[in-house]
Image: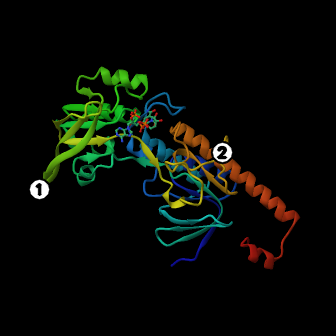
Amino acid sequence: MSEPRTTRCLIVGAGPAGYSAAIYAARALLNPVMIAGIQPGGQLTITTDVENYPGFAEVIQGPWLMDQMKAQAEHVGTEIISDVVVEADLSKRPFRLVCDSGQVWIAETVIIATGAQAKWLGLESEQQFRGFGVSACATCDGFFYRNKQVVVVGGGNTAVEEALFLTNFASKVTVVHRRDEFRAERILQERLNANPKIEVIWNHAIDKVMGDTDPLGVTGVRLKDVQSGATRDLACDGVFIAIGHAPASEVFKGQIEADASGYLKVKPGTASTAIEGVYAAGDVTDDVYRQAVTAAGMGCMAALEAVRFLAEKDHEAAHHPISHHEAEKIGAW
Ligand code: NAP
């Protein structure tokens, strides 16, 4: 196994928050290291058109935007490592993180920008057909539903965008929503209403995903009226679950305070967690705005706070130098 490596600033996660933190930390000469995680580029790599990231008059593509951020982060001096943090000890500084490869990182500051992942309904039948007709990513899987019928579950921006995107392939898209109104932005709702391929079934939930086992594949869904409890079956070839996201904070559980859904808590108006030197930015801490541009802003805040923190520590060390023996005792170097 390789020797532990040290860094002044370890950034965990490679979405807009992580890349922005990296750009600011690198330009402050911290030589940051980024552990890119399972899905480098984050959720924007599985979206298509991005129309609301400032600075681009033309519609841009999510994966392209993330490639640009990555290139910029590397250009200014970030070391990007393809690995996944599987263990973290934030109980004392310097912090110790272990990656899937076995590599141990000793970090003076840690910026957590691990983002969020799609949520599932939690039905047994949903898990049975996951990857075989049940998906949480229209951009990834829409292509397989050319001239087929699909169901989209949810009523937020993601559900409406996925439904619109799926009309490029499917012959019919049925959106099933548990209430009688969407929470998606008006402009998206208008596009959905104007699309003849889309039908909406209000006040219904998915009771069960139905299908064949040999070969494994979806043939329909059992819908349940949330008011009367009545059920009925709807034939379809695919089901797209688009009911929001959950933060990827599992590896830090119990160490950093989180809310009931797992979103990491930061001090209001900052990116600082309760642990000095540990910051959280983007969707892992934000269940309100959840935008690429807000995540990027929080990444910038986290890096600036880390820079300030390290400068203070450097200043203290310069004015109150400690002996080598003392340094070893407190785990500093
Ligand atoms: P969301 O806004 O939280 O919406 C989730 C939807 O799923 C809601 O309609 C919710 O119903 C429904 N839902 C949740 N749990 C459910 C369950 N167990 N069974 C059935 N339905 C369930 O999530 P999102 O659409 O993924 O959006 C997340 C954030 O990203 C938002 O801030 C959104 O604005 C942003 N976003 C922006 C864009 C864009 O700007 N182009 C695109 C995508 C996402 P209720 O309405 O009844 O709660």
Q: How many marks?
A: 2
Report the image quarter containing ligand 1: top left
Task: Give the camera-side residue of 201 and 7.
Answer: 201
Toward the left, the furthest residue is 214
Q: Position of residue 144 (x, y in %)?
A: 22, 44
Residue in view at x 34 percent, y 23 percent: 191
Q: Which mark is residue 301?
A: 2
Residue in view at x 83 percent, y 76 percent: 323
Q: Which mark is residue 214?
A: 1
C-alpha separation, residue under disc 1 versus residue under disc 2: 52 Å
Is 125 drawn above or below residue 225 in the view shown?
A: below
Secondary element at image label 1: loop
Residue in view at x 50 percent, y 31 percent: 56
Task: Give the camera-side residue of 53 and 152.
Answer: 152
Mark 1, other Cα within 10 Å: few <14 / some 14–19 / many ≥20: few
Residue type of the residue flagged with mark 1: Asp
Give the mark, 1 or 2, whose residue is nearer the N terminus. Answer: 1
Is 174 drawn above or below residue 72 in the view shown?
A: above
Residue type of the residue flagged with mark 2: Met
| Mark toward the viewer: 1 or 2 | 1
Q: Which image quadrant: the C terminus?
A: bottom right
Secondary element at image label 2: helix
Answer left or right for 171 relative to 54: left
Q: Assess mark 2: CB under 8 A from ligand 1?
A: no
Q: Position of residue 297 (x, y in %)?
A: 60, 40
Q: Position of residue 142 (x, y in %)?
A: 27, 41
